[in-house]
Image: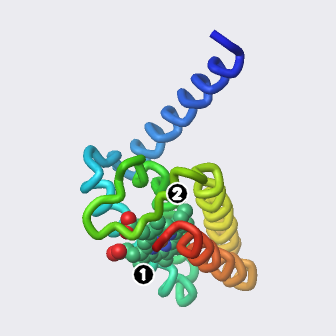
Amino acid sequence: MSIRTMTMRALAGLALAGSVAAMAQDGFAPPATPEEALAMRKALMREDGGILRSAGELSGAEAIAALEKLRDNYSHIPTLFPEGSIVGDSKALPAIWENWAAFTAIVDSGLATAEAALAAAEAGDAAAYAAALQTLGRSCGQCHQQFRG
Ligand code: HEC
């Protein structure tokens, strides 16, 4: 086995451990079929839209709960786009799997921004919170522009 293969396997193991931890945290179970993946990601995206629309009005514990949900949702995005899941009325573009690293990089930066918004909410820093929400909104658009038809 080459070093590269071993590294890839170790990374895959880590990713798996990470998703198991996420599952334990918020009860998330990965989709079993492409149709289920489509339904789950549509529901998740709509929920994120609702959170982002209302989050600006929130503060304290409510803001923290909203941003925790958004962060958890973001962490599940890659799992909800298994290859071969352009089914039904999906607007997902094949570019997602051709540029998987770019796709997941947008997810990762969104995750970091959600963490920043969460920290700002916890610290009661309204300006940093508002700024992080704006950046988050741009991450939705950035991904849709590249990866949604
Ligand atoms: C990493 C990429 C990515 C990010 C980040 C992302 N989206 Fe999406 N979104 C997609 C793709 C791809 C689709 C199309 C899914 C499909 O139809 O299979 C989609 C679909 C949607 C839909 C339509 C759902 C439906 O019912 O058809 C909404 C609403 C949406 N996203 C909102 C958001 C919001 C709000 C955010 C940010 C908080 C966000 N998305 C972040 C990739 C992304």
Horizontal and vertical percent for residue 138?
Answer: 64, 78
SS class, disc 1 = helix
Residue found at x 25% / y 56%: 35
Q: Nearer the viewer, mark 2 or mark 1?
A: 2
Q: Amino acid at mark 1?
A: Gly
Q: In the image, is residue 22 above or below residue 56?
A: above
Ligand 1 within 8 Å, label 2 CB? yes
Residue found at x 49% / y 86%: 53
Horizontal and vertical percent for residue 29?
Answer: 33, 46
Q: Within 10 Å of the Cα at label 2, are there few (<14), some (14-19), or many (20+) other Cα atoms?
A: many
| CA–CA distance in space, label 2 to label 1 | 24 Å
Q: In the image, is residue 89 above or below residue 82?
A: below
Q: Is residue 110 left or right of residue 96?
A: right
> Which of the numbered marks, if any, corresponds to residue 50?
1
Count of picture labels = 2
58 or 22, which is in the foreground? 22
